Image: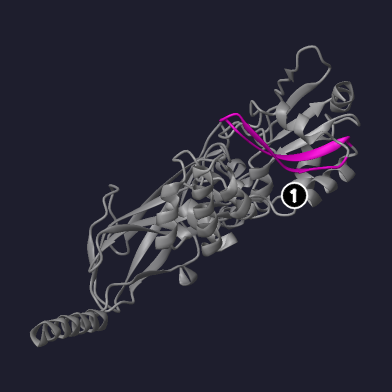
Amino acid sequence: MLIVEGLIIAVVAVIFLVTIFLKRRGEEIVVPKLESRSAWQIESRDEKSVTLSTTVEFRNEGKQSAMIVDAICKPQLPFEQYDGMDVRGKAEKEGKPREDDYFEALVLEHQESVNLIAKVTLTARKNLSLEEAASHMVDFPVEFIYREVGRNPMHWSIARIILTAEELCKQLGTYSIRNEELGIRNENNSSLLTPNSSLAIVPVPTRILTPKDDIIDVIEEYTKDKLGADDVVTVAESVVAITQGNIVRPDELKISCLARLCCRFIPDYGSLATPHGMQSLMIREGEWRVAFALLAGFLGKLIGMRGLFYKWGGHQAALIDDVTGTMPPFDKCVVYGPENPEKVVADLKNRLGCFGAMIADVNDLKRSRIVGATAGMNAQLAADLLIDNPFGNASQKTPICILKNFRQEQEAKS
């Protein structure tokens, strides 16, 4: 017995000593110093294109050596957001320029720094001059994607830099105009008529909306010549949330073990079926509330009670859109449900003078959910009319739909 107890004590002591040893030795911690990066400056320029660069210090603040095996500079500007420029990127080590896109691996000792350069080449399209294309430019992120290895296994990390339209135009000596005016409006508004009725569903194309936009102002702008006193204006919930800034990128999240476990119990087509989708919900609603609701939902299904998870998991449980759930460039983000939807629809109705306003969560799986609706309108009827998802969930850029003559349709069905 004494021998067994001695062995247990010895094993525990060894584990303790090894843990202390490894903790004291530490690991590599590569940190991109984005706050101290250089301003964007022109590397080269011709009649149709310009190359800008910024230098970022990468510092190993850990206790072990690190290796940066690869680095990629990837601008994120889809043509859906702005198609007047073609944008390409390249990553280089300072002092070692290359004509190809190959990145030479490097060693970064502890407490050592290296400067990496992000180069972005912008080329005017659609028969525009460089200055014309730049004047209509929008802000866009440039991702510095780098692969590192050390005591930790090889993995990719991302440092994100914003190239603003103002910075670009300042370098080119031109003036920045808001990006509504160039090649972004589509006036081909097809009406989806409901049989045997005067009601029509009119999708309204817009430019890409961002957190810089005010949703009330935008909807007024795009519907003011199309909306009547008997009509209802509807808007996709994800677009309302985007204009409110209710978005998060998966790579900005620290995924907990609980989120990794809980997401396994969600069907694979759901927005909470990924670790980052589940973590996003836990950040807003609380980890243990979500875990309890998931357990309750699982047990409820066993006795025929469905929907308990979404009932008890918090307001955002049914509203979160995972990556790919909306149009570029926000298809790489997790989008939360909108805040204060009842106030938004009330403000819309008051501003536009229409019969009603509604925010809807509609997808291509034939699901249509009311997020917010004004009093006096039959919101369920409106949701049923949107079941075929005239908003679209990809690059259609029709986040607004007008239900023409909805008042008459509602009265006829009452």
Residue at 85%, 26% in the rendered image: 410
Confirm whether residue 255 shows in the render. Answer: no
> How many other residues sit within 10 Å of disc 1, few (<14), some (14-19) or many (≥20)?
many
Q: Residue furthest left?
A: 3
Q: Residue 245 in magenta?
A: no
Residue 28, percent across and down? 28, 72
Residue 128, percent across and down? 58, 35
Which quadrant would the N terminus be assigned to in this image?
bottom left
Which quadrant would the C terminus be assigned to in this image?
top right
Q: Which residue is mark 1?
A: 341
Residue at 69%, 32% in the rendered image: 205
Q: Is residue 66 above or below residue 369?
A: below
| Nearer the observer, 334 or 262 | 262
Confirm whether residue 219 shows in the render. Answer: yes
Main SS of the magenta part reads strand
Q: Is residue 101 above or below residue 57?
A: above
Disc 1 secondary structure class: helix
Please provide the residue range marked out in magenta: 354-375
Q: Amino acid at mark 1?
A: Pro
